[in-house]
């Protein structure tokens, strides 16, 4: 979780996802999209995050009579969580095997307490698991991924070394972070992040 290279990889993937969305143009009038990123305060990552981590990519249609917003999928930010997506996945996946030593370490590394970890686990197993996006997507996964052990049960489906499975998972769930393809998990522009307390 503290490896700065992971966050550089995720930033590049988000740049690509944003460029694809920009090239596609406005979904309503096919107009040109202008950058209209919104601020985020990422928590839980290493001290040195790549530049741009305090903004989520987003666009606004340039046509005066449209102005429709288009927000591309993201592998960096998960829904309205203030913590970085990678952190919310890994810490929640660890939650099952939490020992007092691990809880202390997570608090030291990320500044999260056991209540926050419990909320993340609840979010994966209830909110995420109940979302239309997940319900449509899980049908493609065989054997089924049990909701009761998300996100660890989903993480296990991706092969690779080091943080490759994590990057693959974040890519996989990225469509759930947009309003158009998404799951009601999208963060509204003015809504505060739900765990920003
Ligand atoms: Zn438009």
Image (cartoon, rainbow, N blue to C red):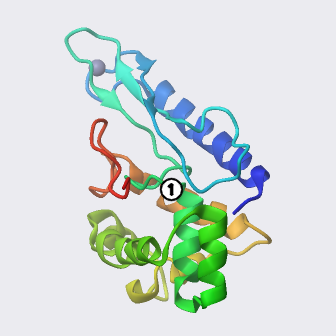
Note whether 118 is above or below 4 in the view shown: below
Is residue 24 toward the left or the right of residue 15 in the image?
left
Residue identified by numbered label 1:
83
Indicate the position of residue 19 as horizontal and vertical percent values. 56, 30
Residue ID at (47%, 78%): 114
Q: Is residue 156 visible to the viewer in this orientation of the structure? A: no
Q: Is residue 82 visible to the viewer in this orientation of the structure? A: yes
Depth check, front residue: 139 or 120: 120
Indicate the position of residue 96 as horizontal and vertical percent values. 53, 89
Badge 1 marks a residue whose secondary structure is loop
Residue ID at (36%, 32%): 70
Image quadrant where one finds the C terminus: bottom left
Note whether 96 is above or below 58 in the view shown: below
Image quadrant where one finds the N terminus: bottom right
Note whether 95 is above or below 63 in the view shown: below
Indicate the position of residue 87 as horizontal and vertical percent values. 58, 63
Indicate the position of residue 80 as horizontal and vertical percent values. 37, 52
Q: Dividing the picture into quarters, in which one does residue 12 lie? A: top right
Residue ID at (55%, 52%): 43
């Amino acid at each position: 979780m503290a490896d700065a290279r992971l966050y550089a990889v995720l930033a590049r993937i988000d740049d690509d996802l944003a460029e694809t969305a920009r090239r596609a143009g406005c979904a309503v009038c096919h107009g040109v999209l202008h950058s209209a990123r919104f601020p985020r305060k990422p928590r839980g990552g290493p001290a040195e995050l790549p530049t741009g981590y305090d903004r989520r990519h987003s666009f606004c249609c340039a046509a005066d009579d449209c102005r429709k917003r288009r927000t591309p999928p993201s592998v960096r930010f998960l829904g309205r969580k203030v913590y970085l997506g990678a952190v919310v996945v890994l810490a929640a996946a660890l939650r099952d095997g939490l020992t007092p030593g691990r809880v202390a370490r997570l608090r030291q590394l990320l500044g999260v307490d056991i209540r926050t970890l419990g909320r993340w686990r609840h979010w994966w197993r209830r909110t995420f698991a109940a979302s239309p996006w997940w319900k449509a997507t899980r049908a493609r996964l065989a054997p089924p991924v049990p909701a009761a052990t998300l996100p660890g049960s989903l993480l296990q489906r991706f092969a690779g070394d080091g943080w490759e499975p994590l990057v693959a998972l974040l890519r996989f769930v990225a469509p759930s972070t947009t309003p158009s393809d998404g799951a009601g998990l999208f963060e509204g522009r003015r809504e505060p992040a739900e765990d920003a307390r």
